Amino acid sequence: MTSGGFRTPTQRHFPVNPLPEAANNPRQAQASALPAELEVRLAALETGAAGSDFDGLSWFWMILIGIVIPVLLLAIGWWA
């Protein structure tokens, strides 16, 4: 059974290209230079010079907020 020409609002009448114009044209993509700060950050990531993600205090707060407090709230709700 057909819809008889009825179009829902989700149907598009034009092609959609999610890629920017630079992705369609390799010459244009190569011509655009990265900002200096981004190049420094990428170089640091490639060499592995980035510091540790979490220190001891961060782990403490993640465990407290993510595990201990929810378990306590569940226990209080269960027995109260």
Image (cartoon, rainbow, N blue to C red):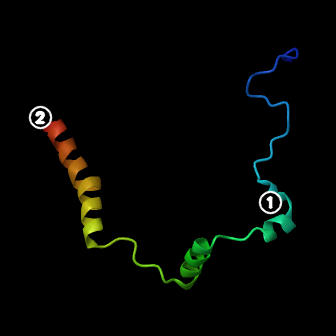
Can you give x and y, in whole percent of width and height, for residue 5 in the image? Answer: 88, 17
**Is residue 40 positioned above or below 22 on the image?**
below
Q: Tell me the element at label 2.
A: loop
Residue kind at label 1, given as amino acid type = Ala
> Is the residue 45 above or below the residue 78 in the image?
below
In the rendered image, which quarter contains the N terminus? top right
Residue at 86% across, 68% down: 27
Identify which residue is drawn at 85% across, 39% down: 15
Task: Answer with mark 2 or mark 1, whichever residue precedes in sequence.
Answer: 1
- For mark 2, does the 10 Å Cα neighbourhood hold few (<14), some (14 to 19), or many (20 or more) residues? few
Using the numbered discs, state the Cα–Cα distance from disc 2 to disc 1 in whole angstroms: 61 Å
Percent coordinates x, y for residue 65 in the rendering: 26, 54
For label 1, the SS is helix
What residue is pinned by disc 2? Answer: 80
Which is nearer the eye, 7 or 75? 7
Label 1, on which residue? 22
Residue furthest to the left:
80
Q: Nearer the viewer, residue 32 or 58?
A: 32
